[in-house]
Image (tube, rainbow, N blue to C red):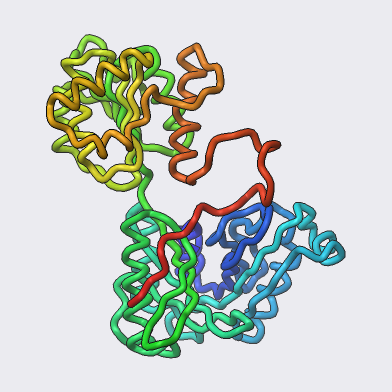
Amino acid sequence: MLELASALLASLAAGRRLAVATVIGVDGSAPRALGTSMAVDDEGRVIGSISGGCVEGAVYDACGRVLESGTAEVCEFGFSDTDAFAVGLACGGRLRVVVQELGLAEARNAPTPALRRALERARDGKAAGVALVVAGESGDAVAVLAQGEGASGGAVGDARARAVLAALEAAVQSGRTERRTVACEGEELSAVLLVSAPPPRLIVFGAVDFSVALAKAGALLGYRVTVCDARPVFATPERFPGAEVVNRWPSDYLAQTEVDERTAVCILTHDDKFDLPLLEVALALPVAYVGAMGSRATHERRVRALLERGIDPAALESLHSPIGLDIGASSPEETAVSILAEIIAVRTRRPGVPLRETSGPLHRQAPVAAEGGF
């Protein structure tokens, strides 16, 4: 829903009613991620895609029914070969989709002020969150709650609403859409927490050839890239187009810049006077990834030096050095692929092995955070 915020708000402003279909369950090798949405307005126009094309026809029909009735529907596609091929979901997975109406302010099913603000924040590239609360064995959707909503939860109930909104706030902070079971007053609610977050940061230290390739590849994957080097002759905007270029002492910059649990820090300088103080700062920060380039001998020398400087040995367990996955990379471009592959593997908690050596669904979700106990 939030990825369609700009188009949804424009349609509402034009006087349209909308049916919004959102993926609230993914099993097996389904083609799209949890939270992906598609919308149909009351003139039959389609916004977005829910499956890359394979179940659009069936979802379109469901949207039409919801626009006519005003009643939400939960649809499932997949697993049965007959059903899967009937809608085009031949990848062997299953999608559960909730379809709900989003109407005008004076009409039925109008967005709450909080939901409208969440859509506006997502449209403007700011962090935003919306929770789809589902309950019962059938998984019927019963409520939509947005970040910043008041305590009243309507059909959900006040206490339940507070519990779900607390879980939503945590999801927004992590920057991840996820499905969680929220426990409240002895009952459990299943909530899909839809999150729109600014691009994660990739901070590259050292203005070397490998950094040029990594900055370009990181931008391609949607990272907001910063390149930091104390030597302005090497770190220039012309050499790193599209990246933020910072000419400061690396450890000073990292200690002062804004980072979060999605930030990746890559140290490519090969110079102990930069690397050692930089690693001390980086390994103490709540970031997603810290990697350092160098040979095994360089890594062992760094570790000894860091231990001599008093760093906690447990902190060194989070250091990815030598940086990257072993794919035989040698050129700067290949090395960039190796580094980003490792960052993705760390983020998704995958081992980084060939798919043919694994079993189970290809599009498995990363393990979810611990269930909420509110």
* Observer-nearest of 139 and 115: 139
Q: Residue at x 31, y 57 (%)?
A: 173
Q: How many marks?
A: 0
Q: Is residue 127 left or right of residue 68?
A: left
Splitting the image into 4 quarters, where does residue 307 fall? Answer: top left
Q: Residue at x 65, y 86 (%)?
A: 69
* Observer-nearest of 290 and 233: 290
The image position of residue 129, as x and y in percent, is 38, 65
Q: Residue at x 35, y 19 (%)?
A: 293
Splitting the image into 4 quarters, where does residue 247 fall? Answer: top left
Q: Residue at x 49, y 39 (%)?
A: 345
Q: Is residue 73 left or right of residue 200?
A: right
Q: Residue furthest right?
A: 82
The image position of residue 287, as x and y in percent, is 29, 42
Q: Give above or below for 125 relative to 163.
A: above
Q: Is residue 196 left or right of residue 42?
A: left
The image position of residue 155, as x and y in percent, is 45, 90
Q: Quadrant of the C terminus?
A: bottom left
Q: Give above or below for 150 relative to 39.
A: below
* Observer-nearest of 213 and 370: 370
Q: Give above or below for 191 relative to 246.
A: below
Q: Give above or below for 78 relative to 111.
A: above
Q: Residue furthest top?
A: 233
The image position of residue 317, as x and y in percent, is 32, 36
Q: Is residue 109 left or right of residue 301?
A: right
